[in-house]
Image (spheres, grey):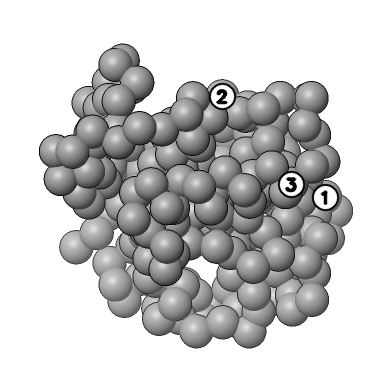
Amino acid sequence: MDERKILVVDDEQHILELIQFNLESKGFNVVTCDNGEEAVRIASKGNIDLMILDLMLPGIDGIEVCKRIRNSENRNLPIIMLTAKGEENDKIKGLNIGADDYMTKPFSIRELLARINAVMRRIKDTESKDSNTIKVEKVTIDIEKHEVRKDDILLELTLKEFELLKILAQNRGKVLSRDVILDKIWGYEYFGDTRTVDVHIRHLRKKIDDNNGTFIETVRGVGYKMK
């Protein structure tokens, strides 16, 4: 049995019941609530392993809930955000302020379970990996030496390409928007010029032999993630 505790936040009772039933059948410990204030209060106790958070909530919405959690002591709580179809701007905003993943309603329980497991796996990988080395498939990133090898062959990357690969690997399975990547790697100087990210992704894919995007996935309208 899986004893991880998941908080599900949605103001539609039938969705709460559907998610709770299916997650509990898989062994998860599930807590539910139907408003943002209660979600923040429950999360602040620090005994939740993951939150499934609806965007549209009475009182404070999902964006504000996510923002408060990321500014709290429990800032590392994994969050999967639920959005209604067509809310592209809110989806991007949610990822920018720290949501780990998102799903668009209506969704399948099977897909939700897959995304939960992917986020949990990423967190586990992050916690267990050597702080100076990140290994993803056949690629090894040595942070201290600033070296990247694939199949033990040293790759020649520019500083920005190295930083781009590193941030994607450190957030494996999580979608990073272009604006977040720009802010983390280039800073304010290139803010808003998302073409810079696209160009570097293209060069990076060529150097790691990932021209088909099987290693670094393009999330249309949002950004990139490493599988």
* Mark 2 vs 3: CB contact within 8 A: no
Horizontal side of residue 24 vs 188, given as left or right: left
Horizontal side of residue 92 vs 207, given as left or right: right
Residue 73's label in the rendered image is: 2
The answer to which of 177 and 62 lies nearer the viewer is 177
Which type of secondary structure does the marked residue at label 1 adopt? loop
Tell me if residue 175 can be seen.
no
State which quadrant residue 32 falls in: bottom right
Three-letter code for the amino acid on which mark 1 is drawn:
Ile
Three-letter code for the amino acid on which mark 3 is drawn:
Thr
User: Which sits earlier in the primary sequence, circle 1 or circle 2?
Assistant: 1
Q: CA distance from mark 2 to mark 3?
A: 31 Å
Q: Residue at x 35, y 32 (%)?
A: 156
Q: Nearer the viewer, mark 3 or mark 1?
A: 3
Quarter of the image with the C terminus in it: bottom left
Q: Residue at x 85, y 53 (%)?
A: 59
Tell me if residue 223 can be seen.
yes
Which type of secondary structure does the marked residue at label 3 adopt? loop
Three-letter code for the amino acid on which mark 2 is drawn:
Glu
Q: Residues within 10 Å of mark 3 (few under 14, many from 20)?
A: some
Residue bearing mark 1 = 60
User: Which sits earlier in the primary sequence, circle 3 or circle 1?
Assistant: 1
Residue bearing mark 3 = 194
The picture places residue 43, in percent across and down from the top left corner, at: 56, 41
User: Which sits earlier in the primary sequence, circle 2 or circle 3?
Assistant: 2
